[in-house]
Image: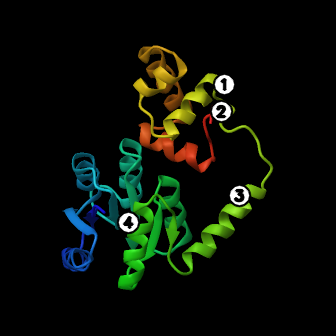
Amino acid sequence: MESLRVLVVDDHEEFRHSLESLLGAMDGVEVVGRAGDGRRAAEMALSLQPDVVVMDLHMPELNGVEATARIVASSPHISVLVLTMMEDDDSVFAAVRAGARGYLLKGAKRQEIRRAIEAVGAGEVIFGPGIAERVTSYFRHVRSRPTAPAFPELTDREREILGKIAEGKDNSEISRELQLSVKTVRNHASNIFAKLQVAHRAQAIVLAREAGMESPST
């Protein structure tokens, strides 16, 4: 079995080194890189293509939520595990909406961290003690709300394309699946971003996932 390749992201150098040492001592885990800010983390994730990114949230340059969104948007197969001191609901749910597959608090035991890395590396979702109950309760409440079409300002075709974007597909993949030209897809995407008032693809993905939006073809 190949080792899980892990990118460690934290702006506190001492904690980052400690975490690297902890992970390096685990069988089946290989630390392939480290970053001290969110912008660098997104760049390194794109170039290194690790299996798992262990991500702090409070960081310079780019916070962990936005860095997570960028990583998931560009490489949806990379799993992000948040490891942070921040346990407020806004931070937890923002990370989940951005695409994080796991959320642990700093101070988690070695066994918890290992189990979480293995779980998200296998495509599962995992939350630390206390976090899981709040997330489950939140999304149970969301599901109980009356349903309505997401983003009524979009046309049916635009909603279909937004669904594909939320799946992490690029314009070329969308054009092939929907049998449209790349230029047509690009124009639709520009219209979508303008209507949703977002600056880039990652923000559109976060909004679509928050709305529980899926492509009509799935």
In the displayed structure, would residue 83 be above or below residue 48?
below
Query: Which element type, helix, strand or loop, lies under badge 3?
Result: helix
Q: Along the polypeptide, which appears first: circle 3 or circle 1?
A: 3
Disc 2 marks which amino acid?
Pro
User: Which residue matches tag 4?
Assistant: 57
Q: Along the polypeptide, which appears first: circle 4 or circle 1?
A: 4
Mark closer to the observer (2, 3): 2
Q: Residues within 10 Å of mark 2 (few under 14, many from 20)?
A: few
Q: Residues within 10 Å of mark 4 (few under 14, many from 20)?
A: many
Using the numbered discs, state the Cα–Cα distance from disc 2 to disc 4 in whole angstroms.
33 Å
Q: Which mark is residue 156?
A: 1
In the displayed structure, would residue 143 be above or below residue 197?
below
Using the numbered discs, state the Cα–Cα distance from disc 1 to disc 2 in whole angstroms.
9 Å
In the displayed structure, would residue 178 be above or below residue 44?
above
Mark closer to the observer (4, 1): 1
Report whether 215 appears left or right of 103: right
Report whether 99 appears left or right of 75: right
Q: Residues within 10 Å of mark 1 (few under 14, many from 20)?
A: few
Q: Which mark is residue 187?
A: none
* Residues at marks 2 and 3 touching, judged by CB atoms closer than 8 Å: no
Quadrant of res 106: bottom left
Query: Which element type, helix, strand or loop, lies under badge 4?
Result: loop
Front-most of 73 and 76? Answer: 76
Q: Along the polypeptide, which appears first: circle 3 or circle 4?
A: 4
User: Which residue matches tag 3?
Assistant: 142
| Residue 209 x %, y % | 56, 47
Q: Which mark is residue 216?
A: 2
Q: Residues within 10 Å of mark 3 (few under 14, many from 20)?
A: few
Q: Along the polypeptide, which appears first: circle 1 or circle 2?
A: 1
Q: Which residue appears at 71% of the width and 63% of the height?
A: 140
